[in-house]
Image (tube, rainbow, N blue to C red):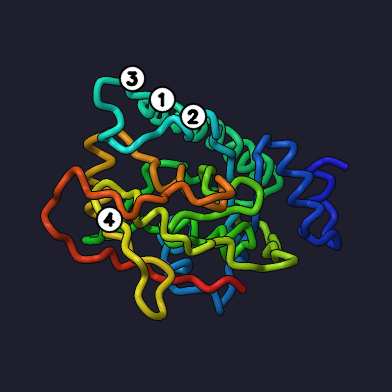
Amino acid sequence: MNVIDTLNRPHQPYGRAWVDRVRREIGADLMGVLAVTPESHPDFIYGVQAFLPTAKAAVLLANEMASETVNLVKPPAKYAGKVKTGALLSPHVVQVTSELDHASSALARMLKQEGFRTLALPSRGLPFRPGQLKATLSYCHIAEAAGMGTVGTHSFLITPEFGTRVRLTCVLTEAPLQTTVRIDPVDDCTHCLDCVKICPVGAISSPGPGRRYEVDGMRCKMYRDMVDNCGLCQKVCSYSTHHSEIGDGPLVAKVHFPAQPVADYDQVDAP
């Protein structure tokens, strides 16, 4: 049975089997669904209303980033007199996001052929909210609510399959897809704080009571813009490496920016 056959059967639930089948057909590594309901988080509703108000679901796609490339990233001081191997990260991100955009476009075409209005959002460059350094839709939080993983101390999604080493994109659709639920939900973040210690500009802080992360979004963005990507927190995440890479205490920030207020990241609770 192909995707069109499945969609043509009104009694066929859009469950895990449908998701797995479609994921393979479009060439995505991971796929999850979060249905739009009256009980959905306000941040999620805000983004849906901005882009496709009639959408009934968001489909999250993820592709793995190559560990061979991510492992080449180093703190700035360690590049002194050496090849800046971490420079390979930026073109690799472009490659992976291009593959994701191709997969999301394929999914959008499938759903639109069946009469469902569908919008494939870009994997990079989603507009910010007015007056805020905050994307209109948080792919990480939607993916978490769709059972694809857990948002960690660094504010990245940690997936059981690939850890933090993934790129995400989102497709909004009028198709009545069902929310994918993780069978054994756990907190994938080990709370080792390696990401806090490795950040060259101190943009990641140890979260305070009741918070899962505290990230200075402006400080992070300024540094990434300056060095054309960074990737250190993704590299050292102990869920991906299976061990703590930071044994000598916190690294001293090598680049200093004016103090900025901690970015106001809203929390989205997984169902």
Q: Does the residue at mark 2 contact the one at mark 1 (Cβ under 8 Å)?
A: yes
Residue type (three-letter) at the residue carrying disc 2: Thr
**Of the image marks 2 and 1, the number of the one nearer the N terminus:** 2
Q: Does the residue at mark 3 contact the one at mark 1 (Cβ under 8 Å)?
A: no
Residue labelled with disc 2: 69
Disc 1 packing (10 Å; few <14; some 14–19; many ≥20): some
Residue type (three-letter) at the residue carrying disc 4: Ala
Residue labelled with disc 3: 83
**Of the image marks 4 and 2, the number of the one nearer the N terminus:** 2
Residue 152 in the image: x percent, y percent? 48, 61
Residue labelled with disc 1: 88
Residue at point 27%, 55% (across, down): 203
Quadrant in which the N terminus is drawn: top right
Residue type (three-letter) at the residue carrying disc 1: Leu
Camera-side residue of 122 and 134: 134
State which mark lies toward you, 4 or 3: 3
Choose top left, top right, bottom left or bottom right for residue 197.
bottom left
Q: How many marks?
A: 4
Query: Mark 4 and mark 1: span between their CA atoms?
Result: 23 Å
